[in-house]
């Protein structure tokens, strides 16, 4: 930009920089040739006929900028999907931990009963076995 001596080219380049930085002064900030002309305070004709190299440069940079934005949107969407999946997995882990606690308690109780019934436990006298239910005869 320092090598430009033409004030119109200088204004166009400064306007391009402001638009890509997201700090427009005269335009609505959209990235297109019309808004570049408004931002540079020049007629659109200067971009489409006289300084086509700047127009082409602007369009190339705009395409790169749009690709970066699209990539950012995709990564944000992927991040949100991963956060949702993570929350579901955490909920599932909580469910499994509750189940595991129930099973551990049941296994502990069964092992105590088994030890008491087999007479391997000193506290066997404290546990009584319930009589079996009789099957009704047909």
Image: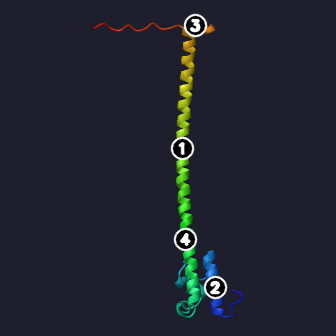
Residue marked by disc 1? 89
Q: Are marks 3 and 2 in contact (CB under 8 Å)?
A: no
Find out whether the residues at labels 2 and 1 contact each other: C-beta distance under 8 Å: no
Badge 4 or badge 1: first in the primary sequence: 4
Query: Residue 35 falls in which quadrant of the image?
Result: bottom right
| Number of residues whose C-alpha sits closer than 10 Å to that of mark 1, classed few (under 14), some (14–19) or many (20 or more) | few
Helix, strand or loop at label 1? It is helix
Within 10 angstroms of label 3, few (less than 14), some, or many (20 or more) residues? few
Q: Secondary structure at mark 2?
A: helix
Q: Secondary structure at mark 4?
A: helix
* Residue depicted at x 68% and y 90%: 4
Relative to 124, does residue 9 appear above or below in the rendering? below
Disc nearer the start of the sequence (2/1):
2
User: How many angstroms separate mark 3 from mark 1 (CA)?
Assistant: 44 Å
Residue 79 in percent (x, y) is at 56, 56
Q: Quadrant of the N terminus?
A: bottom right
**Residue 119 bears which disc, if any?**
3
- Extreme right residue here? 2
Dot 4 or dot 2: first in sequence order is: 2
Please tell me whether residue 48 is drawn above or below residue 72 in the rendered image.
below
Q: Position of residue 22 (x, y in %)?
A: 61, 75
Can you identify the residue that label 4 sits on? 67
Residue 97: x and y in percent read: 56, 34
- According to the picture, the residue beneath numbered tag 2 turns out to be 13
């Amino acid at each position: 930009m320092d090598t430009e001596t033409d004030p119109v080219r200088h204004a166009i380049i400064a306007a391009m920089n402001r638009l890509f930085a997201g700090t427009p002064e005269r335009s609505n900030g959209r990235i297109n040739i019309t808004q570049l002309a408004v931002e540079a305070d020049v007629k659109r004709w200067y971009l489409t006929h006289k300084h086509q190299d700047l127009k082409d440069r602007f369009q190339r940079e705009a395409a790169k900028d749009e690709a970066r934005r699209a990539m950012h949107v995709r990564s944000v969407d992927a991040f949100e999907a991963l956060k949702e999946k993570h929350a579901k997995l955490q909920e599932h882990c909580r469910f499994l931990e509750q189940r595991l606690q129930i099973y551990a308690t049941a296994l502990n109780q069964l092992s105590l009963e088994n030890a008491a019934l087999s007479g391997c436990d000193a506290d066997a006298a404290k546990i009584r076995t319930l009589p079996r239910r009789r099957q009704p005869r047909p």
